[in-house]
Image: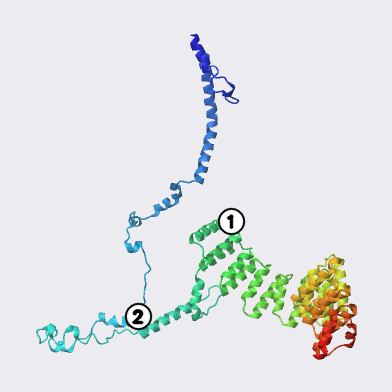
Amino acid sequence: MKKNQAADDDDEDLNDTNYDEFNGYAGSLFSSGPYEKDDEEADAIYAALDKRMDERRKERREQREKEEIEKYRMERPKIQQQFSDLKRKLAEVTEEEWLSIPEVGDARNKRQRNPRYEKLTPVPDSFFAKHLQTGENHTSVDPRQTQFGGLNTPYPGGLNTPYPGGMTPGLMTPGTGELDMRKIGQARNTLMDMRLSQVSDSVSGQTVVDPKGYLTDLNSMIPTHGGDINDIKKARLLLKSVRETNPHHPPAWIASARLEEVTGKLQVARNLIMKGTEMCPKSEDVWLEAARLQPGDTAKAVVAQAVRHLPQSVRIYIRAAELETDIRAKKRVLRKALEHVPNSVRLWKAAVELEEPEDARIMLSRAVECCPTSVELWLALARLETYENARKVLNKARENIPTDRHIWITAAKLEEANGNTQMVEKIIDRAITSLRANGVEINREQWIQDAEECDRAGSVATCQAVMRAVIGIGIEEEDRKHTWMEDADSCVAHNALECARAIYAYALQVFPSKKSVWLRAAYFEKNHGTRESLEALLQRAVAHCPKAEVLWLMGAKSKWLAGDVTSPTGRRRLGTSLGWWPAASRTPSD
């Protein structure tokens, strides 16, 4: 008995390595004790509690498991589910279609399994002319058959008669059914002309087709989308879903119409976009797309309908004017548009472009009243007015728009054009002061671009005045020389030579003793100026830099090339120069 009890004690391993914080020991601590009735009651109570708790959690657990299964099926559907929509369509298959379904397996012959491109050669007309008479019907009887009793010829050997049936000349003569290839060719040309006359450009409204460009037009009708047909079907389904979900969304209708247009279904595109105008009557993009897709007169009707829904839309009025071919009709449309939208700069510009100068001046006078903040309208009116009226117009423009530099530059150009060059410098200086007073930052690069435009327009005094006014703005003192030389090179590259000349002149005023600046200016005059301007510059250069031998030599060479042998003053100045003797010895001999 003691031995059995010792063995049971050995079976229970109560070591720390067999203990778990959550589950406790691996085995039961009281497994060696007796199992009494109260233990059985306790186990029954615990089992009932577990069952009750399990029933309470069952519904929630089953719902969670069902959701997990549905999610898994959505991510990884069965093959049966993938073809469920196709199986539903089988209900529409008729019995004849079901019987015509081939059996499983490739029942084609070798030629069908390995298809090759068939070579088709057009049959010439001579072939038809040659074989036409083989099936010809005769409507007359040979006189010899009537004379000798029909087919009973006096010669018993029918096949040996000199007139066998197959040798009668009736088959060799051209009968009434002769094929006239010339008439067939004429009929074919007539049919082609009829087809060409029926074809027209359905988008732009043209009714005349060039027969020579017919094939080219056919090539242009080929869809150029370059996409897969499956992608187009998916796009159609997606856009259809968008239209049905939100029928008042204009981009959906426009995208649907353009998709059909790209795939070559122009009529479908027109129907879709017209449906879009019904669903989105306040969207000018939809109306403009409808006008673009419709031909000629239909597009005009669409635009007229759009104007009734959107009387304030500038783009629709512009499109209506573009659809008109007559100038008077364009004017009438634009003037009607200005009655509804008088503050549109775009409409005023489009209307003024169609008028004569005198009528344009009158319209611009009204335009600047309706759009007083438009610089373009003020400047256009100033160009059409006389000198005195232009000055008044520009003064009014400065009052209405005190922060725009173009008005000041135009005023300076106006004074220069009328000979008042002394006013140009004052106007530009006043412009810089006034703009700064109104809080406008003077952008040096923008002003230099304006000066270059003045140079290209021939306003030399204005471009030079602008350069002198802004060339030193925003530059550190130690960077002035380097920056100005770069600006001069940039102006030369932009073919603004007067701007570059003004930069060199200003730089020489700031750095009169810099030989490098004088050299750059001299090379500029040598390459882009005249001999007189070069010599005048070199005279000033040697006056400020008398020890610069290269400047003296450049002056001497210029004189020598012009035919003026030497300058005695220059010879005396360079008497002690090391570089003078080769030039002096070469000049008299040459």
**In this rendering, position of residue 104 left or right of residue 157:** right
Q: Compared to 315, does 552 lie above or below?
A: below
Upstream in sequence: badge 1 or badge 2: 2
Mark 1–mark 2 CB contact (< 8 Å): no
Residue at image location 17% in from the left, 84% down from the top: 165
Q: Position of residue 82 (x, y in %)?
A: 46, 49
Single out the mark in the foreground, 1 or 2. Answer: 2
**Amino acid tagged 2:** Pro
Q: Nearer the viewer, residue 151 or 276?
A: 151
Res. 365 visible in picture: no
Residue closest to the eye, 121 or 502: 502
Q: Residue 404, how many percent across, how many down?
A: 81, 70
* Left or right: where 283 falls relative to 219: right
Q: Quadrant of the C terminus?
A: bottom right
Residue closer to the observer: 481 or 380: 481
Instruction: Say what amino acid the circle numbered 1 marks.
Output: Asn
Q: Circle 1 is placed at which residue position?
A: 246
Q: Residues within 10 Å of mark 1 (few under 14, many from 20)?
A: few
The residue located at (66%, 71%) in the rendering is 317
Marker count (numbered): 2
**Residue 378 spot, x, y in % from top left:** 78, 75
Mark 1 lies on a secondary structure that is: loop
Do we see residue 302 in this rendering?
yes
Q: Residue at x 44, y 79 (%)?
A: 192
Corner quadrant of residue 314: bottom right
Q: Position of residue 319 (x, y in %)?
A: 64, 72
In the rendered image of this protein, does residue 91 appear above or below residue 232?
A: above
Q: Which residue is mark 2?
A: 124
